[in-house]
Image: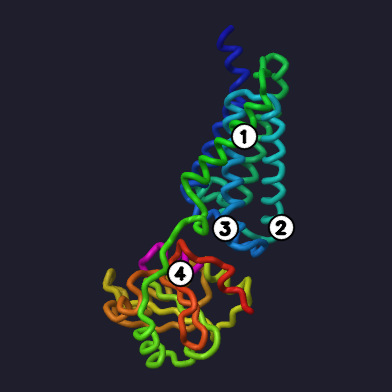
């Protein structure tokens, strides 16, 4: 008899577990998830960073509420799955077949696979709802419980992984003199007008994420190809020629290849001690410097 009662909870428990797992996996791949949202070019990167965390907090809260058998949790879960499914259908109509980040980067789910997952979860919710009359739900102060769970989930997500613009990050060190000498020698046009110089390394994971973030910013604010310069160092981490590694960098990141120059490792680090470093220049004078974590998209808005 006890086993029969327990079996009535299984559908909602299964969906609750999937919601919690989805939230955790998204949080583990937070940088990629917020980048995924930003690349739709609907909101600024800062807004995308907040929205990505709100989605994760909502999934976590709903998952916990389902596991705790809180009243109305199944309705909220069903509504969320419906919204997610509509979004996935739109992606399929647009021909997007890449990872939708529904389960982070651990599981590479295309929109059609994720849509199937959502349909399965909705069927489980419906099954659990049909048996609701046999299951005693938690009724005592359920509104307060939902509020507490939601707040705890929200605070947890933002505390574990704050958006970059909420972090206190020091200005990047650089040498204006060395940078000017480099540009005069290898790319003199960068000393005129508004320019962005990205100092990168082909094997640096943060450099790849910075390049993707900057690509979205360039598109959003209408930067022209001749206003952008990428500088790569001659590193020796592999036996592949530098040009081959640079080509692979742009293919992997799906970033448009624009002006590229290379320089030896030691000289590059005299200009910018760390990679990635992004310079915003006006007539060759550095206006702003950014690392991956400190990129603020509003700084690159054209006046």
> Which label lies toward us, 4 or 3?
4
**Residue where numbered disc 4 is placed:** 290
> Which label lies toward us, 1 or 4?
4
**Residue where numbered disc 3 is placed:** 36
Q: Earlier in the sequence, mark 2 or mark 3?
A: 3
Q: Magenta residues, as a range?
A: 202-212
Q: Residues within 10 Å of mark 3 (few under 14, many from 20)?
A: some
Q: Quadrant of the N terminus?
A: top right
Q: Earlier in the sequence, mark 2 or mark 1?
A: 1
Residue 203 shown in magenta: yes
Considering every residue shown, the one lying at the far top of the view is 1
> Which label lies toward us, 2 or 1?
1
> Which label lies toward us, 2 or 3?
3
User: Which label is found at residue 62?
Assistant: 1
Q: Is residue 108 visible?
A: yes
**Marks 2 and 1, Cα distance to the nearest angstrom?**
28 Å
User: Image point 64% across, 30% down: which residue?
Assistant: 146
Q: Residues within 10 Å of mark 2 (few under 14, many from 20)?
A: few
Per the image, label 2 sits on a secondary structure element best described as helix
Look at the image and name its color scheme: rainbow
**Marks 2 and 3, Cα distance to the nearest angstrom?**
18 Å
Compared across the picture, whether 79 is left or right of 185 comes to right
Q: Earlier in the sequence, mark 4 or mark 2?
A: 2
> Which label lies toward us, 4 or 2?
4
Residue 103 position by quadrant: top right
**Marks 4 and 3, Cα distance to the nearest angstrom?**
21 Å
**Residue where numbered disc 2 is placed:** 93
**Marks 3 and 1, Cα distance to the nearest angstrom?**
23 Å
């Amino acid at each position: 008899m006890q086993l029969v009662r327990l079996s009535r909870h299984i559908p909602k428990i299964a969906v609750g577990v999937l919601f919690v797992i989805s939230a955790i996996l998204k949080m583990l791949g937070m940088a990629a998830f917020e980048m995924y949202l930003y690349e739709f070019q609907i909101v600024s990167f800062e807004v995308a960073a907040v929205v990505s965390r709100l989605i994760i907090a909502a999934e976590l809260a709903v998952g916990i509420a389902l596991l705790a058998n809180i009243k109305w949790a199944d309705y909220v879960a069903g509504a969320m799955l419906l919204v997610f499914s509509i979004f996935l259908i739109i992606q399929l109509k647009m021909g997007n077949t890449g990872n939708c980040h529904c389960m982070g980067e651990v599981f590479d789910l295309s929109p059609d696979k994720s849509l199937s997952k959502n349909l399965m979860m909705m069927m489980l919710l419906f099954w659990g709802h049909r048996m609701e009359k046999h299951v005693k739900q938690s009724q005592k102060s359920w509104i307060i419980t939902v509020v507490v769970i939601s707040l705890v989930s929200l605070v947890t997500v933002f505390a574990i992984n704050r958006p970059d613009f909420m972090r206190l990050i020091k200005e990047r060190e650089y040498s204006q003199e060395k940078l000017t000498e480099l540009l005069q020698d290898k790319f003199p046009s960068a000393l005129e007008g508004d320019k962005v110089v990205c100092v990168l390394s082909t094997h640096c994971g943060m450099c790849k994420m910075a390049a993707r973030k900057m690509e979205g910013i360039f598109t959003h604010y209408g930067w022209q190809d001749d206003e952008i310069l990428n500088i790569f160092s001659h590193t020796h981490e592999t036996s592949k020629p530098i040009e081959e590694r640079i080509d692979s960098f742009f293919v992997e990141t799906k970033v448009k290849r624009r002006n590229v120059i290379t320089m030896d490792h030691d000289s590059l680090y005299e200009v910018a001690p760390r990679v990635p470093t992004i310079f915003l220049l006006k007539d060759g004078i550095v206006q702003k410097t950014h690392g991956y974590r400190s990129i603020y998209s509003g700084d690159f808005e054209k006046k």
